[in-house]
Image (cartoon, helix red, strand yellow):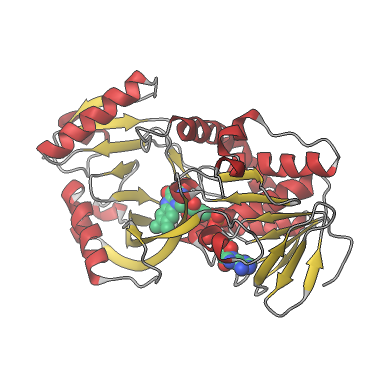
Amino acid sequence: MQDPSFEVIVVGGGVAGLGVAWELAQRGRRVRVLEGRHVGAGATWAAAGMLAPSAEIGFEELDLYALGRESLARWPVFARRLEAASGRSVGYRDDGTLVVADDRDSLRALRRLFDFQTDHGVPVEWLSGEEAVDLEPMLSPRLPAAIVAPGDHQVDNRAVLRALHRAALASGVDVREETPVSRIVPGADRPEVVLADGTTLDARAVVLAAGAWSASLGGLDPAPPVRGVKGQALALRLDPDRGLDLRHVVRGPDAYLVPKADGRLVVGATSEDGVPDTRVTGGGVFRLLEGAVAVVPGVEEMEFVETWAAHRPASRDHAPLLGQSAHPGVFYATGHYRHGVLLAPVTAEEVAAAVDRTLAGAPETAPVLAPFAPLRFPS
Ligand SMILES: Cc1cc2nc3c(=O)[nH]c(=O)nc-3n(C[C@H](O)[C@H](O)[C@H](O)COP(=O)(O)OP(=O)(O)OC[C@H]3O[C@@H](n4cnc5c(N)ncnc54)[C@H](O)[C@@H]3O)c2cc1C
């Protein structure tokens, strides 16, 4: 695999790595992706595919909200390009998102969220419980109120992954699965990547996109401050013929429900910090179903399809690390935490642009990436 014709090595074949690789190939760069297991082995396959910066806005996270809005605005064109390049649908849906309360405490929290959203110009609307049921008849008639975020959309994340894989291959990216990397050795001239089998590869730039595993690779000191936060999720079967159908993404206080074009209803997700395994537990499934039934009682009638768990790559401040790292020749596209699917277009386009400009001898960081520079973390 020692092949000087590759200019960039990307470590990790999730949405971040494949996205950056595909964009770099569009710019004429020769790219190799090294994926330790198989495409879809990480968080991207396990996600719910929500593109929901408005519903998920965090009180201390206005930069992240701006990045999410920017990425959401790019999604329709990104999806069309990806579908054209891969010949596959990515299941983009623009039905909007409902955030609902189900008791007095969650109603207070919903009101606080709405006040914060409107103070910051987030495009949302307050609905009474009745108005919410008019919009989404499967909602519980007992819900006191809801916020509708019409601009928060969704994609089928598994379809996105398959499309990115195919588009990357079609544009000449060399995607190597079952090729774990054990170490990245920085170097401004030609950084090196050492594989688990001892093989050493070099390139003009390396992009670290290994998701929740990003801190476990050797050679980078300091390592990126990224840890895994376990999330369990499950899927049920919608059945429109029996009146079991949802159009909107519904976010309740204890679970969210995401209807997919293939007829699944994804229910997520637990958030378990410091839990290294990916076991699906009775307690996890119980709490998700309980949270789902509280807001959409018809869930009780739906066929059970599957469960899964994976780790979200969370940085110390829960915002992504994007662009040139402290290590010469090494770029980061990691730490996307709960938003890696939402942030796919901006990550792919802007990290690829940063690498491309550096290789062209004119390094420059796009203003949109500035708050997310890996260098914001002291060692
Ligand atoms: C339950 C759940 C629900 C979610 N819902 C949403 C959502 O609705 N919307 C949203 O925007 N985000 C969501 N997320 C978050 C989103 O999934 C992640 O932010 C995103 O997928 C991260 O993508 P990634 O490419 O960085 O990582 P991953 O998809 O994890 O990919 C990393 C890849 O790197 C590979 N790798 C690891 N170590 C090595 C190594 N040493 N050598 C080579 N390869 C290696 C892995 O095998 C893996 O394939 C959710 C996450 C979870 C767990």
Residue at the image position 62 percent from the left and 58 percent from the top:
221
Examine the rendered structure and indicate whether residue 288 appears above or below residue 126.
below
Q: Name the residue at the bottom extreme.
A: 197
Examine the rendered structure and indicate whether residue 371 appears above or below residue 13.
above
Examine the rendered structure and indicate whether residue 97 appears above or below residue 29.
above
Image coordinates of residue 261 in percent, x first then y, are 44, 51
Determine whether, in the image, residue 183 is placed left or right of residue 98.
right
* Occupied quadrant, residue 176: bottom right
Residue at the image position 77 percent from the left and 63 percent from the top:
192
Image coordinates of residue 285 in percent, x first then y, are 26, 65
Could you say which is closer to the camera, residue 243 or residue 349?
Answer: 349
Image coordinates of residue 70 in percent, x first then y, are 55, 31
Determine whether, in the image, residue 138 is placed left or right of residue 345.
left
Residue 96 in view here: yes
Q: Name the residue at the right extreme.
A: 4
Residue at the image position 22 percent from the left and 67 percent from the top:
283
